[in-house]
Protein backbone atom coordinates (compact mmCIF):
# COMPACT_ATOMS: atom_id res chain seq x y z
CA UNK A 1 0.00 0.00 0.00
CA UNK A 2 3.02 2.27 -0.30
CA UNK A 3 3.71 4.71 -3.10
CA UNK A 4 6.57 6.66 -4.62
CA UNK A 5 5.84 9.68 -2.39
CA UNK A 6 7.14 7.61 0.56
CA UNK A 7 10.56 7.61 -1.11
CA UNK A 8 10.89 11.27 -2.08
CA UNK A 9 13.35 12.19 0.68
CA UNK A 10 15.65 9.24 0.03
CA UNK A 11 15.15 9.57 -3.71
CA UNK A 12 16.36 13.16 -3.55
CA UNK A 13 19.48 12.07 -1.67
CA UNK A 14 20.19 9.21 -4.10
CA UNK A 15 19.71 11.58 -7.04
CA UNK A 16 22.84 13.50 -6.02
CA UNK A 17 24.86 10.59 -7.42
CA UNK A 18 22.44 8.54 -9.52
CA UNK A 19 19.60 8.94 -11.97
CA UNK A 20 16.56 7.94 -9.87
CA UNK A 21 13.19 6.57 -10.97
CA UNK A 22 10.51 6.24 -8.26
CA UNK A 23 7.96 3.70 -9.47
CA UNK A 24 4.31 3.40 -8.47
CA UNK A 25 3.30 -0.16 -9.30
CA UNK A 26 -0.10 -0.90 -10.81
CA UNK A 27 -2.96 -0.36 -8.35
CA UNK A 28 -0.71 1.85 -6.22
CA UNK A 29 -0.05 5.58 -5.97
CA UNK A 30 -0.65 7.41 -9.23
CA UNK A 31 -0.28 4.39 -11.52
CA UNK A 32 -3.12 2.78 -13.41
CA UNK A 33 -5.72 0.52 -11.81
CA UNK A 34 -6.29 -3.04 -13.01
CA UNK A 35 -8.39 -6.03 -11.96
CA UNK A 36 -5.38 -8.22 -12.73
CA UNK A 37 -2.61 -8.30 -10.16
CA UNK A 38 0.26 -10.74 -9.58
CA UNK A 39 4.05 -10.64 -9.50
CA UNK A 40 4.49 -11.74 -13.11
CA UNK A 41 2.38 -8.79 -14.26
CA UNK A 42 4.25 -6.38 -12.00
CA UNK A 43 7.55 -7.59 -13.45
CA UNK A 44 6.28 -7.06 -16.99
CA UNK A 45 5.07 -3.56 -16.04
CA UNK A 46 8.56 -2.77 -14.78
CA UNK A 47 10.16 -4.29 -17.87
CA UNK A 48 7.97 -2.12 -20.10
CA UNK A 49 8.97 0.95 -18.10
CA UNK A 50 12.70 0.18 -18.24
CA UNK A 51 12.68 -0.54 -21.97
CA UNK A 52 10.56 2.51 -22.80
CA UNK A 53 13.10 4.71 -20.97
CA UNK A 54 16.06 2.92 -22.62
CA UNK A 55 17.58 2.07 -19.22
CA UNK A 56 20.50 -0.35 -18.92
CA UNK A 57 22.58 -1.70 -16.04
CA UNK A 58 19.84 -0.77 -13.59
CA UNK A 59 20.41 -0.74 -9.83
CA UNK A 60 17.06 -2.04 -8.63
CA UNK A 61 15.76 -1.37 -5.11
CA UNK A 62 12.48 -2.73 -3.76
CA UNK A 63 10.88 -2.83 -0.31
CA UNK A 64 8.47 -5.53 0.92
CA UNK A 65 6.12 -6.34 -1.97
CA UNK A 66 8.35 -4.20 -4.16
CA UNK A 67 11.27 -6.33 -3.02
CA UNK A 68 9.49 -9.44 -4.29
CA UNK A 69 8.99 -7.70 -7.64
CA UNK A 70 12.66 -6.68 -7.73
CA UNK A 71 13.77 -10.26 -7.01
CA UNK A 72 11.54 -11.77 -9.69
CA UNK A 73 12.61 -9.11 -12.17
CA UNK A 74 16.29 -9.83 -11.50
CA UNK A 75 15.93 -13.59 -12.05
CA UNK A 76 13.77 -12.99 -15.14
CA UNK A 77 15.82 -10.24 -16.79
CA UNK A 78 19.30 -10.56 -15.24
CA UNK A 79 20.98 -8.81 -18.17
CA UNK A 80 19.14 -5.59 -17.32
CA UNK A 81 20.13 -5.53 -13.65
CA UNK A 82 23.54 -4.34 -12.43
CA UNK A 83 22.97 -4.59 -8.66
CA UNK A 84 19.92 -5.63 -6.65
CA UNK A 85 18.83 -4.25 -3.26
CA UNK A 86 15.99 -5.95 -1.38
CA UNK A 87 14.58 -4.23 1.71
CA UNK A 88 13.11 -6.41 4.47
CA UNK A 89 11.62 -9.29 2.52
CA UNK A 90 12.90 -12.77 1.67
CA UNK A 91 12.16 -15.05 -1.31
CA UNK A 92 9.92 -17.35 0.80
CA UNK A 93 6.14 -17.45 0.91
CA UNK A 94 4.37 -15.41 3.59
CA UNK A 95 1.05 -16.28 5.17
CA UNK A 96 -1.67 -13.59 4.87
CA UNK A 97 -1.30 -11.16 7.76
CA UNK A 98 -2.81 -7.86 6.65
CA UNK A 99 -6.47 -8.85 6.99
CA UNK A 100 -7.09 -6.29 9.75
CA UNK A 101 -5.73 -3.46 7.61
CA UNK A 102 -7.80 -4.51 4.61
CA UNK A 103 -10.88 -4.76 6.82
CA UNK A 104 -10.24 -1.24 8.10
CA UNK A 105 -9.83 0.20 4.62
CA UNK A 106 -12.94 -1.57 3.33
CA UNK A 107 -14.97 -0.26 6.29
CA UNK A 108 -14.64 3.29 4.99
CA UNK A 109 -17.58 4.61 2.95
CA UNK A 110 -16.39 7.84 1.35
CA UNK A 111 -19.97 9.02 0.83
CA UNK A 112 -20.37 9.01 4.61
CA UNK A 113 -16.75 9.53 5.70
CA UNK A 114 -16.36 12.66 3.59
CA UNK A 115 -13.51 14.28 5.54
CA UNK A 116 -10.04 13.00 6.36
CA UNK A 117 -10.91 13.24 10.05
CA UNK A 118 -13.94 10.97 9.60
CA UNK A 119 -11.87 8.48 7.59
CA UNK A 120 -9.27 8.40 10.38
CA UNK A 121 -11.98 7.75 12.97
CA UNK A 122 -13.10 4.62 11.12
CA UNK A 123 -9.56 3.35 10.60
CA UNK A 124 -8.79 3.86 14.31
CA UNK A 125 -11.46 1.31 15.19
CA UNK A 126 -9.31 -1.36 13.57
CA UNK A 127 -5.79 0.09 13.81
CA UNK A 128 -4.16 1.37 17.02
CA UNK A 129 -0.68 1.92 15.57
CA UNK A 130 -0.34 5.63 14.83
CA UNK A 131 2.49 5.11 12.35
CA UNK A 132 0.47 2.65 10.25
CA UNK A 133 -2.57 4.91 10.48
CA UNK A 134 -0.67 7.91 9.11
CA UNK A 135 0.94 5.73 6.44
CA UNK A 136 -2.50 4.63 5.19
CA UNK A 137 -3.96 8.13 5.36
CA UNK A 138 -1.30 9.34 2.90
CA UNK A 139 -3.25 7.37 0.30
CA UNK A 140 -6.46 9.35 0.89
CA UNK A 141 -6.87 12.21 -1.59
CA UNK A 142 -9.52 14.48 -3.11
CA UNK A 143 -10.58 12.64 -6.28
CA UNK A 144 -13.10 15.34 -7.11
CA UNK A 145 -14.41 18.40 -5.33
CA UNK A 146 -15.96 17.11 -2.11
CA UNK A 147 -15.13 13.47 -2.95
CA UNK A 148 -12.35 11.58 -1.19
CA UNK A 149 -10.87 8.31 -2.46
CA UNK A 150 -7.90 5.98 -2.02
CA UNK A 151 -5.05 6.25 -4.48
CA UNK A 152 -4.61 2.46 -4.43
CA UNK A 153 -7.12 0.10 -6.04
CA UNK A 154 -8.58 -1.41 -2.88
CA UNK A 155 -10.97 -3.76 -4.68
CA UNK A 156 -8.24 -5.40 -6.74
CA UNK A 157 -5.75 -5.56 -3.86
CA UNK A 158 -8.37 -7.16 -1.61
CA UNK A 159 -9.44 -9.63 -4.30
CA UNK A 160 -5.86 -10.59 -5.18
CA UNK A 161 -4.35 -10.37 -1.71
CA UNK A 162 -3.18 -14.00 -1.72
CA UNK A 163 -0.82 -13.14 -4.58
CA UNK A 164 1.21 -10.79 -2.37
CA UNK A 165 2.56 -13.61 -0.20
CA UNK A 166 3.73 -15.80 -3.09
CA UNK A 167 7.28 -17.16 -2.98
CA UNK A 168 9.94 -16.57 -5.60
CA UNK A 169 9.70 -19.55 -8.01
CA UNK A 170 12.01 -22.47 -7.20
CA UNK A 171 15.28 -22.93 -9.10
CA UNK A 172 15.49 -19.28 -10.16
CA UNK A 173 18.70 -17.38 -9.58
CA UNK A 174 20.43 -14.06 -10.05
CA UNK A 175 24.22 -14.14 -9.99
CA UNK A 176 24.78 -10.40 -9.69
CA UNK A 177 25.67 -8.55 -6.50
CA UNK A 178 22.69 -8.42 -4.15
CA UNK A 179 22.14 -6.65 -0.83
CA UNK A 180 19.38 -7.68 1.57
CA UNK A 181 18.62 -5.06 4.21
CA UNK A 182 16.85 -6.38 7.29
CA UNK A 183 15.11 -4.30 9.95
CA UNK A 184 16.56 -5.18 13.35
CA UNK A 185 13.09 -5.31 14.93
CA UNK A 186 11.40 -7.03 11.98
CA UNK A 187 10.80 -10.75 11.47
CA UNK A 188 10.35 -10.56 7.69
CA UNK A 189 13.93 -11.85 7.26
CA UNK A 190 15.10 -14.46 9.80
CA UNK A 191 18.23 -16.58 10.18
CA UNK A 192 16.30 -19.47 8.62
CA UNK A 193 16.00 -17.45 5.41
CA UNK A 194 19.76 -17.32 4.90
CA UNK A 195 20.14 -20.60 2.93
CA UNK A 196 17.13 -19.81 0.73
CA UNK A 197 18.48 -16.36 -0.05
CA UNK A 198 21.85 -17.86 -1.00
CA UNK A 199 20.16 -20.48 -3.20
CA UNK A 200 18.53 -17.76 -5.29
CA UNK A 201 21.19 -15.05 -4.90
CA UNK A 202 24.60 -16.65 -4.50
CA UNK A 203 26.44 -13.32 -4.55
CA UNK A 204 24.39 -11.76 -1.74
CA UNK A 205 24.82 -10.45 1.78
CA UNK A 206 22.39 -9.56 4.55
CA UNK A 207 22.90 -6.35 6.53
CA UNK A 208 20.83 -5.35 9.58
CA UNK A 209 19.50 -1.81 9.86
CA UNK A 210 19.56 -0.93 13.56
CA UNK A 211 16.59 0.40 15.54
CA UNK A 212 14.18 -0.23 12.68
CA UNK A 213 11.27 -2.51 11.90
CA UNK A 214 9.68 -3.34 8.56
CA UNK A 215 9.64 0.31 7.45
CA UNK A 216 13.41 0.45 7.86
CA UNK A 217 13.92 3.09 5.16
CA UNK A 218 11.75 5.51 7.17
CA UNK A 219 12.71 4.44 10.70
CA UNK A 220 16.47 4.63 10.16
CA UNK A 221 16.88 6.44 6.87
CA UNK A 222 20.47 7.45 7.65
CA UNK A 223 21.85 3.92 7.95
CA UNK A 224 19.60 2.72 5.13
CA UNK A 225 21.01 5.39 2.82
CA UNK A 226 24.60 4.75 3.88
CA UNK A 227 24.31 0.98 3.38
CA UNK A 228 22.83 1.39 -0.10
CA UNK A 229 25.45 3.93 -1.20
CA UNK A 230 28.28 1.81 0.20
CA UNK A 231 26.99 -1.22 -1.68
CA UNK A 232 26.54 0.64 -4.96
CA UNK A 233 29.95 2.35 -4.67
CA UNK A 234 31.97 -0.85 -4.27
Image: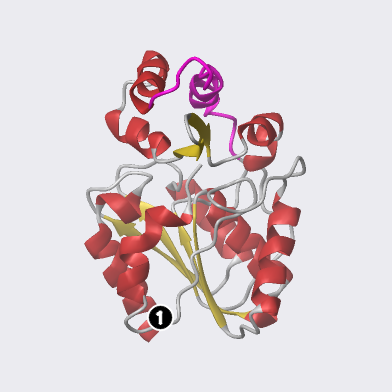
Q: Residue at x 60, y 47 (%)?
A: 92
**Residue 60 vertical position relative to residue 117 in the rendered view, above or below:** below
Q: Residue at x 47, y 38 (%)?
A: 142
Residue 77 falls in which quadrant of the image?
Answer: bottom right
Of 40 and 8, the residue lying toward us: 8
Q: Main secondary structure of the magenta part?
A: loop
**Residue 92 vertical position relative to residue 77 in the rendered view, above or below:** above
Of 203 and 68, the residue lying toward us: 68
Does residue 184 appear in the picture of this structure? yes
Identify the residue position indicated by label 1 in the image: 232
Q: Residue at x 25, y 55 (%)?
A: 220
Instruction: Indicate the secondary structure of the residue bearing disc 1.
Output: helix
Q: Residue at x 36, y 42 (%)?
A: 186
**Residue 120 vertical position relative to residue 92 in the rendered view, above or below:** above
The x, y position of residue 68, in whole percent, is: 59, 54
**Residue 36 vertical position relative to residue 41 in the rendered view, above or below:** above
Residue 67 falls in which quadrant of the image?
Answer: bottom right
Does residue 234 appear in the picture of this structure? no
Of 117 and 17, the residue lying toward us: 117
Badge 1 local density, few (<14 within 10 Å), some, or many (20+)? some
Q: Check the image and tell me how it is coloured.
A: secondary structure
Position of 120 compared to 57: left or right? left
Query: Range of the magenta residues?
Result: 94-115
Residue 179 falls in which quadrant of the image?
Answer: bottom left
For the C terminus, give its image quadrant.
bottom left
Residue 78: within the magenta? no
Position of 197 compared to 141: left or right? right
The x, y position of residue 183, in whole percent, is: 34, 50
Amino acid sequence: LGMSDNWKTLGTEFSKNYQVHLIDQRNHGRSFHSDEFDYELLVEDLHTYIKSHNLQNVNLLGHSMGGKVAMLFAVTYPNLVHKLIVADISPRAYKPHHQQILAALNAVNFQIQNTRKKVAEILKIYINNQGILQFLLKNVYWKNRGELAYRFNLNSLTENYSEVGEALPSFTEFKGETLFLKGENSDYITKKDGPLIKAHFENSKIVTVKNAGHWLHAENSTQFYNEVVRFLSN
